[in-house]
Amino acid sequence: MSLTIADAIEKASKEYLAAKGVESADKLSENEKAELIKLQTKAMGEAMVESAAKNLETVKSSVEKTVEELRAENLKTTANLEQYKQKAEEFAVMLQTVSAKQASGAYGENPRVAKALEEVKAFHKDVIAAAKANKEGVFTIKADTLTTAVADSTRGVMDSEVARLANRRLTAYDAVGRKITIPPNMGGTYRYLDQDSGTSVRAAANIAEGAASPESTIAWEQKSLDLKKISDNIPYSDEFEYDFRDLMMELLWFLRTNVEIIEDNQLINGTGVGVQFTGFLASIPAYTPVASGISDPNLFDLMVKVKESAEATEGSKYNFDVVMLNSADITSTNWLLKKDANDNYVDLATKAAAYGITVITNNSLAANVMIMGDSRYARIIQDGVIRVTTGIKINAEGIEGISRMLVETRKNLLIRDLEATGWREVTSISAALTTLGTP
C-alpha cells in the first residue's frame, strides 16, 4: 500500500531516530540532523515514485477498457473512432512524458515504475496496430489537414523540470563563523557572561622595591538572548497531494526559500525589537574614517584602514577577515571595475584575499554600506535545523480535507557587547573614501 508523503516522512523519521536510540530530533547532532533531512527528502521522493507507477497503471487500464468497448462496437461510427483516437493519443502523450522523466532519472531506480513503463510501451504498440487495422473505410480525407486546423490544443510533451522563482543570494548565515544549537527544555533563551568593562580595571604598573603592589579589579555580568521565530505555510487539499505528488517537493522548496530570505534580511537588518532578530547593524559600532592622504582611494584601501583601526588597539583578539557588500558596490569602479591610469583593470579582489579578507556579496545590505569584522566573534544561536511539518488539518476553519505544509525556524544573531568592537559598519562608503583621500 502506498504511503502519503506525510506518512512516508514520518516513517523515515521514526526509523532513523530509533536507529540512533533517541526519541526526538532535538537530541541529534548537527550532522545527524542533516542526514535525517536527506532521509526525509528521499522518503518523499520514493512516495512520489510510487504515485507515478500507480498513475501509469491507471492510464493503461483506462485505455484498455476504452479499446475493448470500441472493438465490441466494431468502430461503426466516426464518433467512436474519434474517441478511440483521442484515448490513444492521450495515452501516447502520457507515455512520452513518463519516458522522458525516467530517462532523466526523475524516478530513480524504482523497479515498479520500470515494470509499468515496459508494460505500457508494449500496450501502446497494440493500440497503434489496432488503429491501423480499423482505419480503412471509416473516414475519408477530402482535403489536406494541416496543424493550423487544430485550435487551442494542449497536446505536447510535458517538461519534467519545474521553473522556480529567482531570489537574491542568501549569504549572511555563511558569514557567521559559529553556530550554536540550544538543547530542548531550555526556555528558548541563551545566557552568557561578559566581563564588565565599566568596573574592570587593569592596574599593573612599575613599582619600587618594597612598595605596595597596585590592585586590579574585575567583574562579570550575565546577559541573555532570546530566539526569534520565522514561519511560513501553504494549505493544500488531500486531492492535490494525491494528484500532484511531484509538486509537493516544490511546496517544500518554496516555503524553505521564503523563510531563508527573511532570515538573511534579519541577520543584517533586524532591530532586536519585538519578534525581530538583533542583526549586525543593530549590534556593531560605526567606523570613523580618518584623513589619510591616500591618492584615489578604493574599497581595498578602506578595508585596510578599517582592519587597522581595530587591530591597532585590539589586535591580540581580533583579525578582521570578512567583508559584506551590496552587489552595486562589488561591481563599482571602487572594486571590480577599478582601473589604473592606463585603463587596465586593477585586481583588488586578489589583493584582499592575499591580505586575509574574504569579500561576500549580500544584497540584504543597502548599497554604499559595508560591514567588516572577525567572523569568529559573531554567533548564530538556534534551536536546530529548519523544521518541516505536513498534514496539519485546519479543523478550526471548518474545512475538511485541507492540510498545511508548515516551515519554521528559530534563530538569533549574537554579537556580545564586549565583542562588538570585533566588527565595524561603514555607514557611507563614498564619504569614507573621500575622507581617506583628504591629506
Image (cartoon, rainbow, N blue to C red):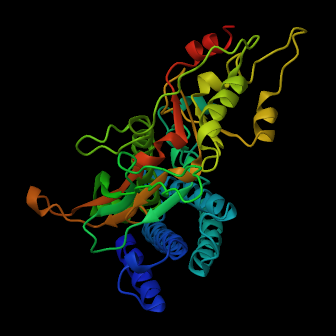
- Residue 231, how many percent across, how many down? 31, 52
**Residue at 59% across, 62% down:** 98
Q: Which of the pair 117/91 is nearer the observer? A: 117
The image quadrant of residue 268 is top left
Q: How many marks?
A: 0
The C terminus, quarter of image: top right
> Is 139 positioned to the left or the right of 13 in the image?
right
The N terminus, quarter of image: bottom left
> Is 4 positioned to the left or the right of 394 in the image?
right
- Residue 262, how many percent across, how many down? 39, 42
**Residue at 60% across, 18% down:** 290
Q: Is residue 226 visible?
A: no
**Residue at 48% across, 65% down:** 74
- Residue 31, how many percent across, how many down? 55, 73
**Residue at 61% across, 72% down:** 117
Q: Is residue 327 visible?
A: yes
Q: Which of the pair 168/192 is nearer the observer? A: 192
> Is 57 positioned to the left or the right of 434 in the image?
left
The image quadrant of residue 182 is bottom left
Q: In the image as oriented, which residue stretches furthest toward the front?
A: 210
Q: Which of the pair 186/100 is nearer the observer? A: 186
- Residue 285, how many percent across, how many down? 46, 33
Q: Which of the pair 29/207 is nearer the observer? A: 207
The image quadrant of residue 5 is bottom left
